[in-house]
Amino acid sequence: MRAAAAWSAAVILLIAVGGLVVYALVALRAATVPMMVALLATSLLQPVMPWLLRRGLGRGAAAGLTCAVLVLAVTGVIALLVNSLVHSAPEIAPALVQAGDKLASWLGPAGEKLQYALQQSSGSGSSLINSLASGVLSGLGLVTQLLTGSVLALALVFFFLRDGHRTPEAVGRYLHGRAADTVVACGQQAFGAMAGFMRGTTLIALIDAVFITVGLLILGVPGAPGLGALVFMGAYIPFVGAFLSGTVAVLVALADGGLSKALWTLGVVLAVQAVEGNILQPVIQSRTVELHPATIMIAVVAGAGVAGIIGALLAVPVSAAGLGVITVLRGASGEGPPAEDGAAGEPPTPPQA
């Protein structure tokens, strides 16, 4: 009974502390979300800094140049994606409606109910437009928040790139000895896990989008560039994003060319996903993100429930960083010489990252 009571108290305390931390992060999302985005961007851009420093640039100039290139790259990618989706939307939207009609006709009475529900939802489009029109001010407020968050994230990226090498020194000012070494090792391991996730996911998303777009163009599926853009964006949400973007591509092919084209499209999507899962991820990401697929799915769902699409995007890198911290702490607790007289209870020396 004492052991059960002790474990119960520990679990309740852990859940309470975790809940308070999550609540604080959500309540302060105007600052925490830009900081997380800045950390992910910094982990992606960090290898550029040594290359620029070897060419004679100072840390400030190198960080500023990297941020300028980042702004141009992000602006260009967003412009290409938006342009592709806008030009493909007139082809994708009617195809999805036709696919819904075909599925409804195949399902019989149940399909008639589904078709009726779709008609009712489409009939409410005017009310939706009116509500959107009446919410212009709130929309402007959202745009203002996005711009403010983007500026804050960009500024944080600059400071992280310029002053990130001073982190061990800054930690040493507040902590000393083994505690400082442990904190630095945990930070380096977490940062390395996020860097591995971002670089690997970006490269895999680009490869997936290119090959699926080529396959859709060969099959003659309408809106292939827009569907490829959806594949690229969805790749940053493991499992869920690939499933949704692949489903949209199959439905568009079903509406355009019937069951045979839909099956060919499904084959292309599954083939690319199989190559990604069996070859690309093991080779590109290697052992940087050692998360079980079940853990990734739970993290994505939990992140989406806590913070919506932003939470789903940040769930996996945050989980990978947490796993890196746990790995360092477990290694520190399992290493070190046996305690001598008078030294019992002192923590062992942590491994240097």
Image: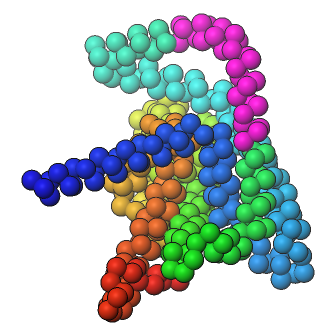
Q: Is residue 129 magenta?
A: yes
Q: Magenta span: helix, strand or loop, mainly?
A: helix
Placement of 222 over or under 335, stated as above or below: above
Name of the residue lying farthest toward the left: 1
Can I make out residue 236 in this image?
A: yes
Name the image quarter holding the C terminus.
bottom right
Placement of 208 over or under 325, stated as above or below: above
Query: Of 252 and 70, which appears nearest the observer?
Result: 70
| Magenta-highlighted residues | 122-149
Q: Position of residue 208 (x, y in %)?
A: 56, 56
Q: Residue at x 69, y 62 (%)?
A: 42
Q: Residue at x 22, y 50 (%)?
A: 8
Placement of 95 over or under 172, stated as above or below: above
Q: Is residue 215 magenta?
A: no
Can I make out residue 80 in this image?
A: no
Placement of 81 over or under 295, stated as above or below: above
Please give left or right for residue 38 compared with residue 338 in the image. right
Q: Position of residue 149 (x, y in %)?
A: 72, 42
